[in-house]
Every structure is written in structure tokens, then in C-alpha cells.
């Protein structure tokens, strides 16, 4: 999820020269070896907005993320919001404010949107413990759905969601939006061009260090059981009296959320799957962590370190809410390193060869060493003026975390019936990695994926 300062950086990019149409062609390298990537092609696509060609969607959940999705979605050509559902009435007002439509139909009961024949699809941004029910209900009602990440709250739920999508032939897009970003596409192209060779290890890291980053959100001041259907909000979580902190900070508790795994790592895992062309569940996960910095009653760790085994390739993940570090996915191979950050990609090629006589020869007696060094230079020195030149290349682009093209990919698929970039199978695989990380943390043991029973085993 984006923090305020991340939005600021993004806004800066949007209002700066990069977004003002002065992007250079994708291949135009500057002298400092920085390449500015073209914007997403959808921005220049000519779209028909004839009424018969419009995509009409219903919005479910207009909270922190839903308000952003709604704001972005209604700016896309040919896309219209025709109804909104939320259990908290304050968000009915918000939906009408965002759409500038004081008559927008709003309801506490999302089923009313699913029953409407004039609604083509749903965009849902409800807490994690609601994802399965909303997706299954939408698919069974014949609606395509964009559902926020992580796809599921448990591994079992994910398979029920995949089955509902397949049985009803519905389009399901999961909301880890980086897979639709220009930077995501460039990272994937670079990897498949072989710039680092076959990946041998991946490191995924992200750190925050402030209350909002640690989910200590301020609940809406007027929130009460009078304007919120609290019992329904709880869904299958244990029944407890109204609690405004649980409503606003649900990520802190496993009964509703999926911790830093489902909140943050799922983006990194989805980006990794997309970059490398992987679409699978890891074989095993081994996690460490704890509540170090925010002992505020939460039961989810605020520091979570995980080592996954993806068909023999180690994937190391570090997620922390106690020290800020930049978000980074690092792919390492024999030909170098591909670092993918929030607004750029850095390719650091390596030749993987000795560029000078081996220092092991310092253990040779003098004559032997001199002979070795002489021979080495004779065999390896490049001709004068032909010395190889290695340099890093930085690709700068739009925000890695780019919601608009991801929504666009979904709405286009609703019309074309072509597959989306992040379907239920892909989303399920990324979410199960998060559930494995959490299972290992809570059990204090390594966990394994058992495909025969489709369960996580210790
Ligand atoms: N893709 C991203 O970058 C990103 C960023 C933030 C959040 N998210 C995801 O978006 C989802 C929502 O997160 P949030 O921070 O917006 O939560 P939030 O608590 O701010 O908003 C959720 C809203 O859903 C409503 N809701 C809950 N159950 C409902 C139901 N059955 N029917 C109708 N409305 C219901 C709540 O009343 C609330 O208004 C989560 O799954 C989260 O992981 C994704």
C-alpha cells in the first residue's frame, strides 16, 4: 500500500517533465546511461465511449484503497461507476463525492449490486477476510470482478475462488497492480532477454518506520454501530463488540488481515512471479519475526523475515515496520543484478571472469608467481584500446505501483473476454506464499506445500 509521501513522489512524477509528454522514446539512452521509459500505451489508445460500449461497474468497499480505485477507474475512458456498497454509511457519502454524483445508488448490501442487470462488473476493496465471499458471490452472480490483493485469507479459500471463476467463466483480476506497470513490463523483458542469465537468487525487501506505515490509522471520528453494520463487517471472524480500532486497523489482526505478508510481500511476490515468468506455489517457507516496534495489541508480526524455496531457487524476503528501507526486488544471476525499485530499474552487468591474475598466486614463491602473472597477462589482456566497458543502466519510469493500467487491463478484458494479467490462479499462488510465511511464523517451524492435499504442512 502507498504511503502519503509515496503519493507525493508519484504526484511529482506525474506533474513533472516525465508525465508532461516529454518522455523520450523507450530506447533513447542518455549520456549517463539513464533510459526513460515510454508511458503505458493505454494513455494514447483511442477509445469509443458510446453508451453501448461502456463498462458499467459497481464498487464494493470505498475505504482507503477503494476510494483510490474509484477515483482512478472513473477517469478511464468508457468506464462508469453506477453503484456503490459499503457497510459504513460515511463511505456512501464518499462514493458520491468521488463520482460527483449525488444520486449514485448506494447500499450496505453488496448483493444488490450483484443482482443488477445493468452492472457488468465489480471492483472490490474490502478487508482480506471478505475477499473470498465477495469474489465467489460475484462470480456466481455472473459478474466479473477486480478484487484487491492478497487474493485470499487462507489457502483453502483461494482454491474456492479459482473454482468459482472457472465454473462461471468469469474474469477475476487480483489487485497487485505492479504487474501492469511499465517498469514491471521492462523488468520482465530485460530478464527474458537474458541480461542477468538464469536467476539464481532473489531478495525482496521493504521497510517502514512510522505509525501510518505500521497501520496505526485514525478511525473515522463518527464511526459507531449506528452508521456501521459491525456484525456483518466481522464476517466469519470471532464475534466481538464494536471496536473502531479493529475496523480501521484490521491489518494488525490475523482474524481479518494477513499481516505484512499479505499487505506488502504479496506485491513483491507478484512482481517476482511476473518478472521471472513464474506461476507457482513455493515448495517451502521458513520464517522468523516478532512484534518489536508496535506492541499495540496486534497479533501480526511487525518484522517478518522469510526464506522460500521456489523449485530450488532461494527467495529471501525481509519486511519490517521498524526501520525504513527502500522497496527493492533484487534478481541475481551469473551475468549480473537486476534491481527493481519503486520508480526505476537498475541493471548492473557482471562479466563473471577474472580481470587480473588470481590473488591466490600470492602464495607462490617469487619465480613461480612472476611466471604465472606474465602468462596470465599474455593470455587475458585485451588489446590496447579494446578494453571492455561495463556500465550500469538505469531505467526510469512511471510508478512501479501503477493502479490505472491494472484497472484498464481489467475493464478491457471485461469487454474483450481476453485473459487479464493477474488472474485468480496467479493471485492464488502469490497469496499462498503469504499464508506459508504466516504459518511458519506462528508455528515457529518450516512449512511445506503439499500439492496432493493442497494444504500447508509443518
Ligand atoms: N493494491 C494495493 O496497493 C492496496 C493498497 C491498500 C489496500 N489494498 C487492499 O484493499 C483492501 C481494502 O483495504 P483498505 O485499506 O481500503 O481497507 P479499509 O478498511 O480502509 O476499507 C474497506 C472498506 O470495505 C468495507 N466493507 C467491509 N466489508 C464489506 C462488505 N461485506 N460489503 C461492503 N463493504 C464492506 C468497509 O466498511 C470499509 O469501508 C484490502 O484487501 C487491502 O489489502 C490494496
Image (cartoon, helix red, strand yellow):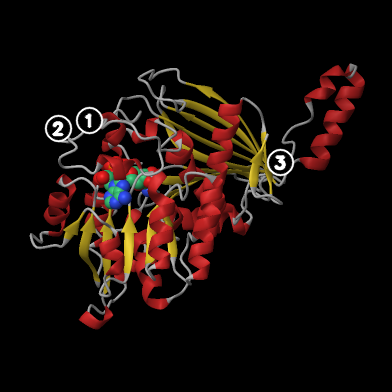
Residue at 23%, 44% in the rendered image: 229
Q: Residue furthest left?
A: 102
Judging by the rendered image, the residue that carries numbered circle 1 is: 218
Mark in front: 1 vs 3:
1
Q: Nearer the viewer, residue 445 or 175?
A: 445
Label 2: element kind: loop
Q: Quadrant of residue 133?
A: bottom left
Residue at 28%, 58% in the rendered image: 110
In the picture provided, is 71 more to the left or to the right than 262?
left
Say if mark 2 contacts mark 1, CB within 8 Å.
yes
Label 1: element kind: loop
Judging by the rendered image, the residue that carries numbered circle 2 is: 221
Asked if residue 42 can be seen in this view, the reply is yes
Residue at 59%, 38% in the rendered image: 436
Quadrant (top left, top right, bottom left, bottom right) of the N terminus:
top left
Mark positioned earlier in the residue sequence (1 or 3): 1
Q: CA distance from mark 1 to mark 3?
A: 52 Å
Say if mark 3 contacts mark 2, CB within 8 Å.
no
Position of 454 relative to 434 (above/below): below
- Determine which of the numbered discs, if any, sits on residue 352 in the image: 3
Residue 5, given in percent of the width and then of the height, sits at 27, 36
Label 3: element kind: loop
- Determine which of the numbered discs, if any, sits on residue 182 in the image: none
Q: Tag 3: Cα neighbours inside 10 Å, few (<14), some, or many (≥20)? A: few
Q: CA distance from mark 2 to mark 1?
A: 8 Å
Amino acid at each position: 500500500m502507498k504511503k502519503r509521501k509515496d503519493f507525493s513522489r508519484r504526484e511529482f512524477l506525474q506533474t513533472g517533465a516525465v508525465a508532461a509528454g516529454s518522455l523520450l522514446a523507450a530506447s533513447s539512452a542518455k549520456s549517463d546511461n539513464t533510459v526513460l521509459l515510454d508511458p503505458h500505451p493505454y494513455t494514447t489508445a483511442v477509445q469509443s465511449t458510446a453508451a453501448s460500449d461502456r463498462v458499467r461497474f459497481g464498487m464494493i468497499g470505498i475505504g482507503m484503497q477503494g476510494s483510490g480505485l474509484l477515483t482512478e477507474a472513473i477517469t478511464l475512458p468508457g468506464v462508469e461507476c453506477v453503484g456503490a456498497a459499503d457497510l459504513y454509511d460515511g463511505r456512501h457519502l464518499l462514493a458520491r463525492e468521488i463520482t460527483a454524483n449525488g444520486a449514485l445508488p448506494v447500499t450496505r448490501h453488496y448483493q444488490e449490486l450483484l443482482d443488477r442487470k445493468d452492472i457488468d462488473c465489480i471492483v472490490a476493496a474490502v478487508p482480506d477476510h471478505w475477499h473470498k465471499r465477495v469474489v465467489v458471490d460475484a462470480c456466481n452472480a455472473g459478474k466479473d470482478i477486480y478484487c484487491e490483493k492478497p487474493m485470499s485469507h487462507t489457502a483453502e479459500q483461494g482454491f474456492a475462488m479459482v473454482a468459482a471463476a472457472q465454473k462461471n467463466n468469469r474474469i477475476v483480476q487480483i489487485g497487485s497492480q505492479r504487474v501492469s506497470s511499465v517498469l514491471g513490463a521492462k523488468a520482465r523483458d530485460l530478464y527474458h532477454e537474458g541480461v542477468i542469465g538464469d536467476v539464481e537468487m532473489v531478495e525482496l525487501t521493504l521497510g517502514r518506520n512510522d505509525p501510518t506505515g505500521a497501520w496505526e490509522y485514525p478511525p473515522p471520528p463518527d464511526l459507531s454501530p449506528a452508521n456501521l453494520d459491525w456484525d456483518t463487517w466481522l464476517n466469519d471472524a470471532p464475534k466481538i463488540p464494536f471496536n473502531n480500532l479493529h475496523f480501521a486497523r484490521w491489518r494488525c489482526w490475523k482474524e481479518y488481515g494477513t499481516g505484512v505478508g499479505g499487505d506488502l510481500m504479496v506485491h513483491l511476490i507478484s512482481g517476482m512471479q511476473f518478472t521471472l515468468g513464474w506461476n507457482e506455489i513455493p515448495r517451502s517457507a521458513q520464517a522468523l519475526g516478532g512484534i518489536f516496534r508496535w506492541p499495540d495489541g496486534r497479533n501480526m508480526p511487525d518484522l517478518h523475515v522469510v526464506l522460500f524455496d521456489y523449485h530450488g531457487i532461494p527467495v529471501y524476503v525481509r519486511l519490517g515496520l521498524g526501520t525504513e528501507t527502500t522497496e527493492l526486488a533484487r534478481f541475481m544471476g551469473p551475468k549480473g543484478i537486476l534491481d527493481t525499485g519503486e520508480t526505476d530499474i537498475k541493471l548492473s552487468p557482471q562479466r563473471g571472469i577474472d580481470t587480473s591474475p588470481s590473488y591466490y598466486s600470492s602464495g607462490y614463491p617469487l619465480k613461480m608467481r612472476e611466471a604465472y602473472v606474465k602468462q596470465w597477462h599474455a593470455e587475458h589482456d585485451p588489446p590496447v584500446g579494446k578494453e571492455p566497458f561495463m556500465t550500469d543502466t538505469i531505467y526510469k519510469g512511471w510508478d512501479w505501483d501503477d493502479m490505472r493500467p491494472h484497472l484498464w487491463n481489467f475493464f478491457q478484458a471485461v469487454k474483450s473476454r481476453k485473459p487479464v494479467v493477474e488472474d485468480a490462479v496467479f493471485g492464488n499462488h502469490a497469496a499462498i506464499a503469504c499464508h506459508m510465511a504466516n504459518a511458519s511464523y506462528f508455528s515457529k517451524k518450516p512449512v511445506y506445500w503439499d500439492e496432493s492435499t493442497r494444504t500447508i504442512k509443518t
